[in-house]
Amino acid sequence: MTVVIGVHRSNPSLYHLSRLGYAEEELAALGETVTWHPYTDGVRTGALLAEGTIDFGGTGSTPPITAQAAGHDIVYTAVSAPRPDHGALLVPEDSPVRTVADLKGGTVHLAVGSWQTHLVAKALDDAGLSYTTDITPVRGNSGSEEKLRSGAIAAWVAQGAELVAARRAGGLRTLIRTGEVISDRSVFFTRRDLAEQRPEVVEALTRALRRADAWAAAHPREAAETAAADQGGTVDDWETALRALPWEIEEVTEAFIAEQQLAADVFHRTSFIERAVTVADALPRKA
């Protein structure tokens, strides 16, 4: 069997794992091989699993929920430790926006469909507002920071080295620190057939992820050099961002499932997803 692992820039654990050879080593012990399927948008992970393009993937918290809502039979395999400082919702320093409620009627740039949607939707819901009716969410791009600074948009969710660079430049204020609203974990998942018929493969991939995270934690400068060369930005900004990550892979817990369910309920209530989702359905079935 050849296990196809999806990899995109927004999942740091898989990003570095794809360059380290640990997945290949762990699966070779089972007589299996590995290929990597690069793609640009983690939102597509559920669909790629369902159509058989990949066998295993990782994203933030939102894509597995939207995958379930689309009818894809996924299974959670592992999660990262919480990443409270991975990202933040920024506003201009002199903005009249002082609370989340002040965003009503404004335009917010974010990676729509990613963990950033979870962050913004939950923060708005906590303030009695709706993600789909009280703000205009727009997919962010390379011009988002400039638009924020010019006042063309009300707020922008930044993450990683981009967030570090924006803060270093000054003139912006953190309206929401991610850890104040959600745990923001990396989430790893697969198709049910692989999870239940080949659990040893999932276990091997989880071991590989733990090895990759341990490497990144021990070699932040080298990891930053790799990311900067491939994705842009400065090595120093990347190192600051990578040092802020926990680099720890954990089991899927009841607390994580409960947080995902809260997110799914907010998404359904605000019509971000069209049907209700029972997050616990994405756990392995008991024998």
Image: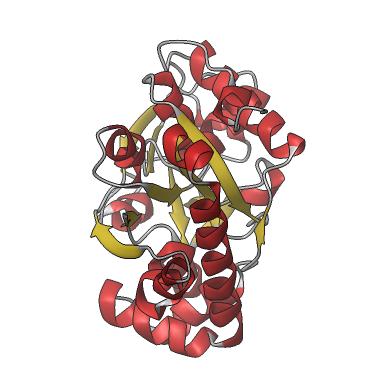
* Image-quadrant location for residue 218: bottom right
Which residue is drawn at the image coordinates 25% and 57% (left, top)?
A: 37
Q: Can residue 88 be seen at all in this image of the molecule?
A: no
Q: Quadrant of the N terminus?
A: bottom left
Q: Can residue 220 be seen at all in this image of the molecule?
A: yes
Q: Quadrant of the C terminus?
A: top right
Spot the residue most to the front: 31
Colour treatment of the image: secondary structure
Which residue is drawn at the image coordinates 25% and 53% (left, top)?
A: 40
| Of the pair 88 and 217, the residue shown nearer to us | 217
Q: Where residue 75 sits: x, y (%)?
A: 52, 35
| Of the pair 73 and 177, the residue shown nearer to us | 73
Q: Where residue 76 sits: x, y (%)?
A: 55, 40
Q: Where residue 20 sits: x, y (%)?
A: 41, 79
Q: Where residue 12 sits: x, y (%)?
A: 46, 65
Q: Give the vertical position of 193 relative to 35 (above or below).
A: above
Q: How many marks?
A: 0
